[in-house]
Amino acid sequence: MIGGVLPRGFKEVLALVEERAGLAAPSCLAAAMEGIQRAMARANQEDVDAYLRELSYDNALFDDLLTELTIGETYFFRTHEHFDHLRRVVLPELRERRGQEHLLRAWSAACSSGEEPYSIAALLMAEGWEERMSVRATDVSRTALQRAQQARYTDWSLRGPSADRMRPHLKQEGRFYWLSPDVKRHVQLGYLNLALETWPSAESGVWQLDVIFCRNVLIYFNRATIEGVARRLHASLEDGGYLFTGPSDPPLADYAPLEPVLTEWGVLYRKPPAGSGAGHFVPLQPLQPLPPLPATVPAPPLPGFRPPPPVASTPAPVRGTPAGGPPAARPGESSTSGTRTRFTLSVEALEAVRAALARGDWREAARRAGAQSADPEGALAAVRALANLDPRAALYACEEASVRHPLVAGLRYLEALLLLGRARLPEAERSARQALYLEPGLAVGHLLLGHVLRRQDQAAAAARAYREAEGLCRKLPPEALVPLAEGERAGALADVARDEARRLERMEG
């Protein structure tokens, strides 16, 4: 490999893989070339052109190559938060909505060597679904399916923090563990190429599903394949069914009318129940109606932050951080300069917002301010504008904006800030962590999380959050503006985070 270019023949091998399996070219071409060479060696082939010809008709060779170009990383109850959510939220909701006699249908869409579908089956058995469950498991690798059918595992499959849940279903013989037939009988294994238009169908067993696990496989697909898979995943779900994807998988809401469900640990999707509409946000724990607020309740500002200026009788600009361009046209005026956006409500729009607030009509105030803007930057600006007028309305506007933009980290951050101002600390922590899940590099999110944790007397965790904020700010030029930091510079904010961390570390020490 010279200058980052694959030698003749290897590029054509990757093109064939993309055509047949939808896998995008790996970002590390050197590693891809090494994988192809290992697969060629197992096939006793030294000539890449001859190998390419064999790949075109030999399914076993093609499957073997796929194992080199993808990572079959799996173990029992991997990403235990997904299984916990399935047990605590999804299964009770399905039982209530579908009835006690409902046959629950689940699918592991990239089952690899079987740990995922067998974990699903074991959980369903433990929750009382043993006689009313069907778990389908498919993969594009026939080699992996053979291992899943054998159901023989080692300690490597039990390395996860929740893998002990599986031990009652395993019989140890030497260094191997054999899966109990009681679990194995509930899982139907089969070959399926997700990139092909062969599903959903009754013949494939992939249809009218209540739960789909399609985790850590979409990251390998090109955009066109992701779009097709997302559309077919939606079609495979029964109304009200749930889809779990991996933490690194791309968002799917732009490709299919799936409802993103944002939880404290990440995002999953739901197909809207019949008659409920589609594509809107479903919060895990909706905020409770806000109690009456005293005349003035100052929100404690974060160290190093200047709160937004109060709105005077004439409209004052409210700053935001652009996300790819100026806000869409909406009531009010906006302009973009460099990397900063200034938003100003017109006098008429401001008066309409004030009138709605006076009536206690927060929905109308949020609408008038633009919280329902189709542009996420416009929605962020609206929330900031309302924060100058009424924190209750601003919090409501955050919820309204999240309906349209559930995956915008800035809205989750503002929600956390507003909740902190009302001393709703557990909810503020949840929203801050959601913001950081969506955007791990959000420095102000780590700083805010540190502030929330400090208020909850979690000094060690707060210090770690402050240190993370400091590290992110130090990576920027000292005079760079920090996103969502109300004009603060990276150097100054890093010093604030450092001082807070040191103070807490001294307390702990």
Image (cartoon, rainbow, N blue to C red):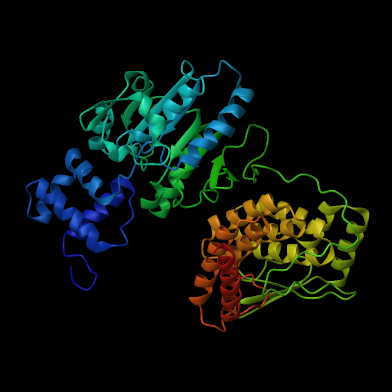
Q: Is residue 428 left or right of residue 502?
A: right
Q: Quadrant of the N terminus?
A: bottom left
Residue 381 versus residue 174: which sits nearer the camera?
174
Find residue 448 and report its horizontal and vertical position in percent.
Answer: 63, 63
Q: What residue appears at the point 46 percent right and 50 percent down from the top-left corner?
A: 247
Q: Report whether residue 100 is seen.
A: yes
Q: What residue appears at the point 38 percent right and 46 percent down from the top-left corner?
A: 217
Find residue 221 and report its horizontal and vertical position in percent.
Answer: 37, 51
Q: Is residue 402 left or right of residue 469?
A: right
Q: Is residue 404 left or right of residue 218?
A: right
User: How many numbered tags mark residues here?
Assistant: 0
Q: Quadrant of residue 401?
A: bottom right
Q: Quadrant of the C terminus?
A: bottom right
Q: What residue appears at the point 22 percent right and 36 percent down from the top-left corner?
A: 143
Q: Is residue 266 left or right of residue 45?
A: right
Residue lying furthest bottom in this view?
479
Q: Quadrant of residue 27?
A: bottom left
Find residue 3 and report its horizontal and vertical position in percent.
Answer: 22, 73
Q: Report whether residue 372 is seen.
A: no
Find residue 397 and report its horizontal and vertical position in percent.
Answer: 76, 56
Residue 252 versus residue 255: which sits nearer the camera?
252
Up/down of 56 relative to 444, above or below:
above
Residue 402 versus residue 183: which sits nearer the camera?
183
Q: What residue appears at the point 48 percent right and 36 percent down from the top-left corner?
A: 83
